[in-house]
Image (cartoon, rainbow, N blue to C red):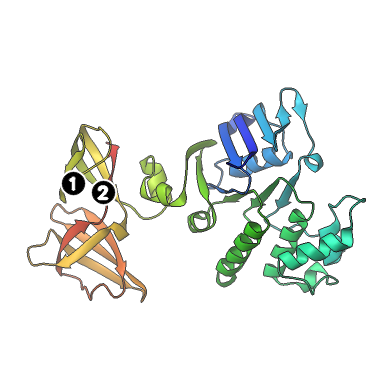
């Protein structure tokens, strides 16, 4: 097992009466990529600033590379934390060339020219060394900022909403490029984002944050398929909910008797994702198609049950030519998630 690159214990920070970060515990191993995901104002950027050393926590301890950098009467300044930072605005120095920007954080004793050359090759920009920031595209500025963060070979890379200023058409491409660069650099990374797709597609693990607290940390697949509560489920994408009656191992709802994990008994809510709901045309079906949105690669159908409750099903575009008014039979592809009502 790789070593722990960063460890936080009971990290808290308040601004007046506002508890921005509330008892955060976090451990990240070398080479791991963690996305810190949450809505605006949840405390994720404050957490990043505490890790970087731009803010001092009220309580708690931070270790980076087995060195205590905050807590126990210790506060190590940002420049001595072995942390590389990529800001939302990139923060390139406009009066410096690409080479000078990348070399800015390197120690005087190092072979700066060779390191700048190496890291620009790593990010795929070996030929723009003499250009100025205003001569670069948004994607190029992004990669130069990443090169500057990687140049000193820090223990930890922090990314603060780094793709939010890019055009939607460019965002997916740059995300994939950055992910590959960070993998090749064997970097340990924490990405702050409010974009669920970004977090799920890039990270090895995702930590969901609400109101200053980490609510769930899991792999993207487990987080999406088995969210710990309804708040996480709805934040991570479309979700269907039905009332149900649970007994250990089972739940009864309008879709019938279904296997269910947990030991809940009594009234519950049954959650499943739209893509987990399979449809078959049937005159005796439980539901009726209300609307259909066809996108080519997939289609989204709104369904109404006999009770009047509305569900959604997302299918491949080739899965069938459904139409409003059609009756369909419903079947879940996976075991649903059950929450206490």
The x and y percentages for residue 311 are: 25, 56
Residue 21 visible in the shown view: yes
Tell me, yes or no, whether the two marked residues, 1 and 2, touch with CB atoms within 8 Å: yes
Task: Name the quadrant containing residue 148.
Answer: bottom right
- Report helix, strand or loop for mark 2: loop
Pick the front one: 217 or 111: 111
Q: Is residue 45 left or right of residue 293?
A: right
| Outermost residue toward the top in this view | 72
| Residue at x-position 92% and y-position 50% | 109
* Residue 118, above or below 13: below
* Residue 42, above or below 99: above
Pick the front one: 175 or 162: 175
| Outermost residue toward the left in this view | 284
Residue 101 visible in the shown view: no
Query: Mark 2 or mark 1, which is nearer the start of the sequence?
Result: 1
User: Number of numbered discs present?
Assistant: 2
The x and y percentages for residue 157 are: 68, 49
**Residue under numbered circle 2:** 335
- Report helix, strand or loop for mark 1: strand
Q: Is residue 83 left or right of residue 247?
A: right
**Residue under numbered circle 1:** 258
Quadrant holding the N terminus: top right
Pick the front one: 185 or 91: 185
| Residue at x-position 61% and y-position 62% | 180
The x and y percentages for residue 147 are: 75, 60
The x and y percentages for residue 233 are: 38, 47
């Amino acid at each position: 097992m790789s070593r722990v690159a960063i460890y936080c214990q009971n990290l808290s920070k308040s601004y007046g009466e506002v508890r921005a970060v509330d008892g955060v515990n976090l451990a990240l191993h070398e080479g791991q990529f963690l996305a810190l995901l949450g809505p605006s104002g949840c405390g994720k950027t404050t957490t990043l600033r505490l890790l970087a050393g731009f803010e001092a926590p009220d309580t708690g301890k931070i270790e980076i590379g087995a060195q205590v950098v905050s807590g126990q009467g210790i506060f190590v300044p940002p420049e001595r934390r072995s942390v590389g930072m990529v800001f939302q605005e990139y923060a390139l120095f406009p009066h410096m060339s690409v080479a000078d920007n990348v070399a800015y954080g390197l120690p005087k004793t190092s072979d700066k020219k060779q390191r700048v050359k190496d890291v620009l090759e790593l990010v795929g920009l070996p030929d723009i060394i003499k250009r100025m920031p205003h001569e670069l595209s948004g994607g190029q500025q992004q990669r130069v900022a990443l090169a500057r963060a990687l140049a000193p070979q820090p223990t930890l890379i922090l990314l603060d909403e780094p793709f939010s200023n890019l055009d939607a058409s460019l965002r997916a491409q740059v995300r994939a490029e950055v992910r590959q660069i960070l993998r090749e650099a064997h970097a340990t990374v924490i990405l702050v984002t409010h974009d669920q797709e970004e977090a799920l597609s890039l990270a090895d693990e995702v930590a969901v944050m609400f109101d200053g607290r980490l609510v769930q940390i899991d792999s993207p697949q487990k987080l999406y398929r088995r969210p710990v509560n309804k708040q996480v489920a709805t934040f991570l994408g479309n979700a269907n909910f039905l009332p149900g009656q649970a007994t250990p191992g089972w739940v009864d709802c309008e879709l019938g008797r279904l296997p269910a994990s947990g030991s809940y008994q009594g009234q519950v809510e049954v959650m499943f994702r739209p893509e987990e709901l399979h449809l078959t045309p049937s005159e005796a079906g439980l539901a009726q198609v209300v609307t259909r949105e066809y996108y080519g690669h997939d289609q989204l159908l709104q369904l109404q049950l006999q009770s009047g409750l509305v569900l959604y099903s997302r299918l491949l575009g080739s899965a069938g030519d459904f139409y409003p008014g059609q009756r369909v039979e419903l079947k879940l592809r996976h075991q649903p998630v059950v929450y206490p009502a």
